[in-house]
Each structure stands twice: as C-alpha cells, then as structure tokens.
Amino acid sequence: MECPDSLLTSEYTELKVEVPEEEEEALAVLHYEEQITELLVVIAELNRKIDRLTVTTIREEDEYLDTCSDLSDSHYLETSTCLCSDQDQPMDSDCPGQPCQISRITGEPCELSQKLHQVLTELEDRVRTRRMEIPHPCTDPAEEEGAALAHWELVTQRIEEVEQELGVDLSPELQEERSQWEAELDCLREKNQHLADQLLEKDQELWRVTAALGGIQQERDKLRLKAGDLLTCLQSLQQNVTVSPLPRPFPSIMGAMTAGSSTVDTNLEAIVDTDPRFVVERLTRSFQSCSSIQDLFRFLHAHGPNVTRGRIRDSEIDEDQLRK
C-alpha cells in the first residue's frame, strides 16, 4: 500500500505546480485530463487490491473454521471450548492478524479515496476557472490568426518545457504524428493564403464590373431620354401628317403660275431624299426665297409630302437603333 500512496502523493504534488496566469486553456486542460486519467487508474488499482484482500481474508477464515471442525470426536467439548475461546480472542487482539489488519487496510483506502476526491474536485474547479478566463475571440480575422499562432507557439513551448522537466521523451509514433500535423498545418496555411488572394482578385473584379455597370446604366438613361424626345417628335410629325390636305383650287392656281416659279429651289427634292437632316434649313431658305403667296403654296404642294416622309423615316431609323 505504500507504492500507490507515494504515487498519489507525487501526482498530487505535480498538480500543485503553479501555472502562469498568461498560459492558455488548452495546455491546462490537457494537463488536467492526463492527471485525472492517472488518478482514475490509481483508484481502479486500489479497488482491485481491496477486493483481493477481502477475498483472502474470507478464505483464511473459512480454512480456519474447516480446520477446527476436523478435530476428533473425543475432544469435541475441549475443541468447542477452544474454538469459542479462539473466536473470542481475536477480538481481544490475542490473534491480532486478521481483524486488525482488515481495519487498517480498510482505513487507508478511505483516506486515499478522500484525497482523490479532493484532488478531482480541485481539478474541476481549476478547469472551470480557466474556462471562465478565456478571452473573447477577435473580430478581425488577421488578429484572430495572429492570436492563434501565438497561442500555438506558447503551448508548444510549454509542452517542451514540461517534457524536459519530467524527463519524458516522445515516442517515434508521437513524433511522426506531430510532423504530420505540422505538414498538414503548413498545407492549410498555403491554401488559406491562396484563397485570400483569389478573394482579393474577385473583389477587384467585382469593383470593376460595378463601375462598368454604373456607366452602362448612365448611357441607358441618356438613350431613354433621347428615345423619349424622338418619340415626341415623331408623334408631332404624325399629327402634322393627319392634318387635312390643301384645297383643290390651289393646283389650278399654281398651274397657272408656272412662269413665276423660278424662285423655288429645284434641287430641294433631291436633297430631302438623300439627307433629311437638313430639311428644316432648306425649308427656311426656300420659304424666304418665295416672292408671293402663290409660290409658297406651289412649293408646299410639290415638296410637303416628301419632306414629311423623309423626316418620319429618319425618326423611325433612330428609334430602331435605340431599341436595339
């Protein structure tokens, strides 16, 4: 029983090592879990030893009773008297082997159990306290990553210091596992950096597309305004076309005035058919060149439909281009 007690005392002493307040929770929780596991193993070993001692004591008592019952019949009364005296004497510590030893054995596990319970309670309190002292995570991803790296370095350094103090060497399996985790961590860091670069490129592309879309929307608004103006002009032209034609007597009058029609521009019809954009200018000049009302009527009767058709055709072409 001295070996488990000394083991428990050494483990309990290791648990009493003061942990720096700046150490993070991960190392403390890992250390506490290891200690709890070892204590549970000690408790299980003590329980097994108690069970073995109890079974041994019961077996020895049974053997003693069997030996007493095998005495000869001739000495039955004396044997019975001796048996009664022998059964009474251990209570008086005449045979101090079994009962006193049992009481002493059962007393030590009770004390050990109380110590273990106290240690476990203290460990749970420390773990709960450390969890309450965990700082809130950073909102900035860069700061959070930096804090995680600093925490990882601190934990690694602390583990190495504890291993050096305890003289524990990592097994080849653990070293290989650690190297695998480090390689995987490096790979994940590279992927994270690659994804961050891709995200930055996508953000820049999105900004360029947004700017281009804003320009396209402005162009669309301008084209809509221009289309509205053209539609208004087209409607006004259509209303002018639907006006009632000139009276019939004018052709006869204008036919009689053929001699005085030299002031009308004879090339106006060709200009209207080829380039309708200069219709207004040409009309103004032609109106100014007319010397009499008869010449004006003759001009309107001859070129009015062509001018109207050319202007309507030009407006329809502009409208189709805008719609496309």
Image (cartoon, rainbow, N blue to C red):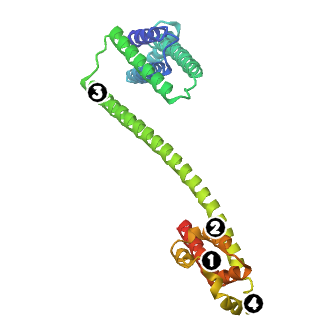
Q: Residues within 10 Å of mark 1 (few under 14, many from 20)?
A: some
Q: Earlier in the sequence, mark 4 or mark 3?
A: 3
Q: Is residue 73 visible?
A: no
In the image as oriented, which residue stretches furthest toward the left? 172
Q: Earlier in the sequence, mark 3 or mark 1?
A: 3
Disc 2 and disc 3: Cα gap in Å?
76 Å
Disc 4 and disc 3: Cα gap in Å?
106 Å
Q: Secondary structure at mark 4?
A: loop
Residue at image position (73%, 80%) is: 293
- Asked whether, in this view, residue 172 is left or right of residue 248, the answer is left
Q: Residues within 10 Å of mark 3 (few under 14, many from 20)?
A: few
Question: Which of 6 and 315 lies nearest the eye of the viewer?
Answer: 315
- Asked whether, in this view, residue 233 is left or right of residue 41, the answer is right
Amino acid bearing label 2? Leu
Q: Earlier in the sequence, mark 4 or mark 2?
A: 2
Residue that numbered label 1 is attached to? 263
Residue 230 x/y as whole percent = 64, 67
Residue that numbered label 4 is attached to? 247
Viewer-side label of 4, 2: 4
Disc 4 and disc 2: Cα gap in Å?
31 Å
Residue at image position (50%, 74%) is: 274
Q: Earlier in the sequence, mark 4 or mark 1?
A: 4
Q: Secondary structure at mark 3?
A: helix
Amino acid bearing label 3? Ser
Amino acid bearing label 1? Thr
Disc 2 and disc 1: Cα gap in Å?
33 Å
Residue that numbered label 2 is attached to? 230
Viewer-side label of 2, 3: 2
Point out which mark residue 179 bears.
Answer: 3
Point out which mark residue 24 bears.
Answer: none
- Asked whether, in this view, residue 261 is left or right of residue 80, the answer is right
